[in-house]
Image (spheres, grey):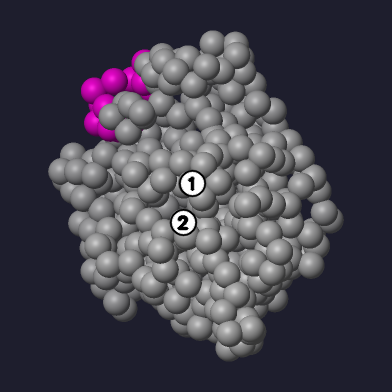
Amino acid sequence: MARRRTPTRSRALSGLAALALAPLALTACSAGSLGSSSGDEGGGTTITWLTGSDETAQATATSIVEAFEAANPDIQVELDGRPAGGEGDNLVKTRLQTGSMPDVFDYNSGSLFQQIAPEKNLAPLGEDVVGAVDDAYLPQVSVGDTVHGVPYGTAFGGGVMYNMDVYEQLGLQVPKTWAEFAANSEAIKAAGIAPVIQTYGETWTSQLFVLGDFHNVAAANPDWAEQYTAGQAKYATDPAAVRGFEHLQEAHEKGWQNTDFASAELEDGMRKLAAGEGAMYPILSGNITTLLGVDPTAGDRIGFFALPGEDASTNGLTAWYPNGVYIPKTTSGAQLEAAEKLLAFIASPEGCEAQTQASPPTGPYLVEGCELPEDVPQVTKDVQAYFDADAQSPALEFLSPVKGPALEQITVEVGSGIRSAADGAALYDQDVEKQAQQLGLEGW
């Protein structure tokens, strides 16, 4: 169950959400005219929900709507679909700017949420709607103390999937420091198993040693994201921030990688992990679906731990948060009341259960009272444990709009021995500077 903590609100967040898997775009959309106004029919209220047009998005929303309408027979919810990627992103912004957004829509939380001018465009939500939402999530959909959204889907982490059988056979413990991680890697290598799986055939997977290490950066300097956004903190000159690059270099120099790291892809990495040919795979926990796709029996023998830093006392998870569901300010009257009921339902145990019926969760629901099914994979249980222990913090992209587009190419070079960690970090600082200047940020 997601834990409730003392209510707090962080400063307004901004940034660019990344590492999202592109959904399969389908041509068919559900009933309703995109952007049309909703009205009352037959004495009830009809509202429209704009969501993704891909199969998973439609199935999840449909499951929620069916359960919601059963509990609220006087409300009908029609689903509209939007395209994936940049086209869908532009559509959301255009609909908000022109006042033609349907009554409810789902969209990014954290960074991109701030880019749709929530104070101007989104209705504020009361405690009756968001009361069950975990406080760890609220800053991702808030401006100051004003909350505008509820979580849709589950959280996931950036860390290390590991083969529990290999760990047990070698008598290893989950590492809480990098020194322990390195010692484990040497023991695994001595046993003839690749300690660290890398899959540069899909370059995005090379970023985890850097992006998944941000909890440790923030533990060393809680203001790092703010200083970074202002152009005051740099990867190459900050001892804590550069460590992710250094760890990537160390894995290559010490021969911890699988021999085919340069060409292997995500599915290859998951096969090696499941078969015990590799012991640890730095990756996003949400990719448990890929693991189960290549080996449906692997769910109970593959675990997950956060990338360790220098200090065991601050060990914790770098977390990626789910999208949010929002109500535009153009929704009013009976439609506003119905929309608020829908959001409150989504942020309830019944709403979580409806989502689970459509798609098994790959991480914790950040809603009080939402329990994970007993048969979820061990990776999902391990990620949940970090949230239960309040040992997690947001990935950098939820705190800053600055993320250079060349990071995955740079981390491939560092992880391949082509470029040193110091040079890679300095090059990424240059890449970031260009992107910050394009965004018009002060201090760059």
Where on the picture, by quarter, is residue 277? bottom left
**Horizontal side of residue 119 vs 296, given as left or right:** right
**Residue 412 among those drawn in magenta:** yes
Range of magenta residues: 411-424
Counting labels gives 2
**Residue 362 among those drawn in magenta:** no
Look at the numbered disc 1 and give the secondary structure of its residue: helix
Instruction: Report the residue at 39% width, 72% height from top.
Output: 31
Q: CA distance from mark 2 to mark 1?
A: 7 Å
**Quarter of the picture holding the C terminus:** top right
Q: Is residue 245 visible?
A: yes
- Up-down relation of residue 394 to residue 343 (above or below): above
Q: Give how far across and how far down residue 9 sits, in percent.
A: 78, 45
Q: Is residue 259 visible?
A: no
Disc 2: which residue: 35
Q: Nearer the viewer, residue 102 or 293?
A: 102
Disc 1: which residue: 95
Q: Nearer the viewer, residue 270 or 31?
A: 31
- Up-down relation of residue 181 to residue 36 (above or below): above
Q: Residues within 10 Å of mark 1 (few under 14, many from 20)?
A: some
Q: Nearer the viewer, residue 149 or 291?
A: 149
Disc 2 + disc 1, Cβ < 8 Å? yes
Instruction: Report the residue at 76% width, 40% height from top.
Output: 144
Instruction: Report the residue at 41% width, 41% height from top.
Output: 90
Q: Nearer the viewer, residue 382 or 353?
A: 353
